[in-house]
Image (cartoon, rainbow, N blue to C red):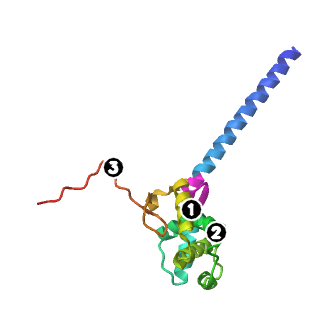
Amino acid sequence: MKALSGETGAAKRLAVGTVAGVAAVSLLGACSTVTKQQAAAVVNGHVIRLSDVAETAKQLRAANLDFSEEIVVTALIAAPLLHETVAASGSWKPDATYANVVNAMPGATDTTKTFVSTVALLQSAQMTSADVAQYRTDLKQARISVNPRFGSFVPSDQGPVYFSLGQQAPDWIAAAPASK
């Protein structure tokens, strides 16, 4: 009889452990879904939150800098790749432009500061051709997803960020023939 109750106890522990494991996986999956739903974009696993984009756009407007949320998302997607490139080469460090803009925004969030530094970097024109080549290589290899609210990630041959956010034309749509 003791052997049976011992087996029953082991079976109960196994069942409870299995249910707990399934519940944990479900909860983690739900967290991942919530994070994706709250994301403006994800770059190599780094989530750019919708709330951070909205707050950055709000802080920029308060400083009389009119940038749309789409521009904020574009800069924040490029930011980690650009900053890694120039950090490795030493070709750019936050400059007076960056300092002046950030100082004009008391209480600027880290996301706002990242946006400002990215725009200052792009406007400085201090990236070398090697920096641009490295950035473009990193951009091609990056895992980037964008919230449909902002469109799709569309690679481009045009700088300074070499991509845009917008609608891609489906490959089944052909241009109309020129009329004669």
Q: Which residue is mark 3?
A: 171
Comparing 89 with 68, the one in front is: 89
Q: Where is the N terminus found, in terms of image quarters?
A: top right
Q: Where is the C terminus found, in terms of image quarters?
A: bottom left
Residue beneath the point at 56% across and 53% down: 36
> Which amino acid type is marked by label 2?
Ser
**Residue 154 image position (x, y, % from top left):** 43, 58
> Which amino acid type is marked by label 3?
Asp
Front disc: 1 or 3: 1
Residue beneath the point at 77% across and 24% down: 11
Residue 22 as seen in the image, left or right of residue 156: right
Q: Residues within 10 Å of mark 3 (few under 14, many from 20)?
A: few
Magenta residues, start to end? 34-48
* Residue 18 in view, yes or no: yes
Q: Label 2, label 3: how many angstroms apart (C-alpha)?
A: 39 Å
Residue 134 - label: 1
Mark 1 in CB contact with mark 3 (< 8 angstroms): no
Front disc: 2 or 3: 2
Q: Residues within 10 Å of mark 1 (few under 14, many from 20)?
A: some
Residue beneath the point at 53% across and 63% down: 133
Q: Label 1, label 2: how many angstroms apart (C-alpha)?
A: 10 Å
Q: Is residue 46 magenta?
A: yes
Residue 89 - label: 2
* Residue 152 in view, yes or no: no
Mark 1 in CB contact with mark 2 (< 8 angstroms): yes
**Residue 161 image position (x, y, % from top left):** 49, 67
